[in-house]
Image: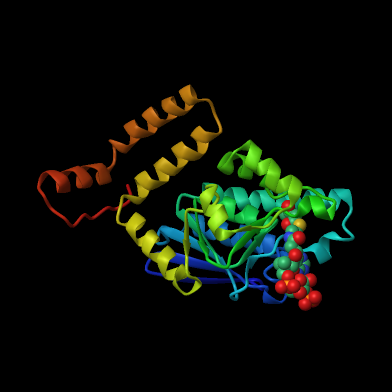
Amino acid sequence: MNNLILEVENGIALLTINRPKSLNALNSETLAELNTCLAELEKDQEVKAVILTGSGEKSFVAGADISEMVNATAPEGRTMGLLAREAFSRLENMPQVTIAAVNGYALGGGCEISMACDIRVASENARFAQPECGLGILPGFGGTQRLARLVGKGRAKELIFTCDQITAEEACRIGLVNHVVPQAELIDYCKAMAGRIMKNSPFTVALAKQAINTGMDTDLDSGLKLEANLFGLSFATEDKKEGMTAFLTKRKEKHFIGK
Ligand code: CAA
């Protein structure tokens, strides 16, 4: 991989987008590498959580690579959009929990890739924007869809139409990020959160993720039916026996095996 750094430790994969000279902008090669890497990670039973970040202290991801897009034709633009769609949907739906550690600029495709993660934690210096309309394109890596679902139609339209940059605090206020922490603490904070999640049954965390993701894209009644079915499925697991027995016998330590 030319543009990614993958470090796996204690069940947590730290995946760093590493193109510091262009503030970690996403070119086609990086998108293809992301897709391949996530396809491997989603099959890896040892990996229980993925933290996505950018290299350096200035930028998470400063968007799609403008120097690649400037001469791209309409079909090439569509191909790039589809490449991102494949990688980002994989990220969104992988069974492991994904946390974006937003360590600086999250602009355009950077904001969009963070929104494909389950949870976003931002450093105090992080800035978010969808600057595409100022470049004569529109958000094409999921921004028109995921931003509206996360922060509501009105706020998404304001951000996309104005191209305004917002601070980490403002992003937190509108629900775009979950927490804002000092930059020096960002990765440890995300690892600690991943650790708390990993104490629970990984199988049921994956089912809950599926219920939320699918449910948010359907009507309430269909979402509730899906939830009831997945709730039922969780009763067939060893993890359910373990979790409930531990509670009833007042045992603190639990040993979830993920099935
Ligand atoms: N694509 C390609 N190169 C980029 C880039 C991008 N998105 N963002 C930054 N760079 C490059 C700059 O061209 C510069 O390269 P050189 O040193 O070779 O000149 C280098 O990174 C450092 O950037 P700056 O000198 O501009 O740094 P700065 O501190 O003055 O500004 C910034 C930082 C505000 C992030 C500014 O670089 C910027 O506005 N970048 C573009 C942000 C943007 O518009 N992103 C959206 C892209 S479109 C998109 O993402 C479409 C989509 O929906 C997927």
- What colouring method underlies this structural image? rainbow
- Of residues 66 and 200, the one drawn nearer to the viewer in this rendering: 66
- Of residues 242 and 114, the one drawn nearer to the viewer in this rendering: 114
Whole-percent x, y for residue 46 in the image: 40, 62
Q: Quadrant of residue 4?
A: bottom right
Ligand 1 lies in quarter = bottom right
Q: Is residue 117 left or right of residue 146?
A: left
The furthest residue to the top: 221
The furthest residue to the left: 249
Q: Quadrant of residue 20?
A: bottom right
Q: Residue at x 16, y 55 (%)?
A: 252
Q: Compared to 152, does 188 lie above or below?
A: below
Q: Residue at x 72, y 47 (%)?
A: 160
Q: Is residue 132 left or right of residue 200?
A: right
Q: Quadrant of residue 27?
A: bottom right
Q: Compared to 189, does 136 lie above or below?
A: above
Q: Residue at x 56, y 53 (%)?
A: 171
Whole-percent x, y for residue 5 in the image: 57, 72
Q: Is residue 74 left or right of residue 85?
A: right
- Of residues 103 and 19, the one drawn nearer to the viewer in this rendering: 103
The quarter of the image holding the N terminus is bottom right
Whole-percent x, y for residue 98 in the image: 49, 55
**Res 64 visible:** no
Whole-percent x, y for residue 208 in the image: 40, 41
Q: How many marks?
A: 0
**Res 212 visible:** yes
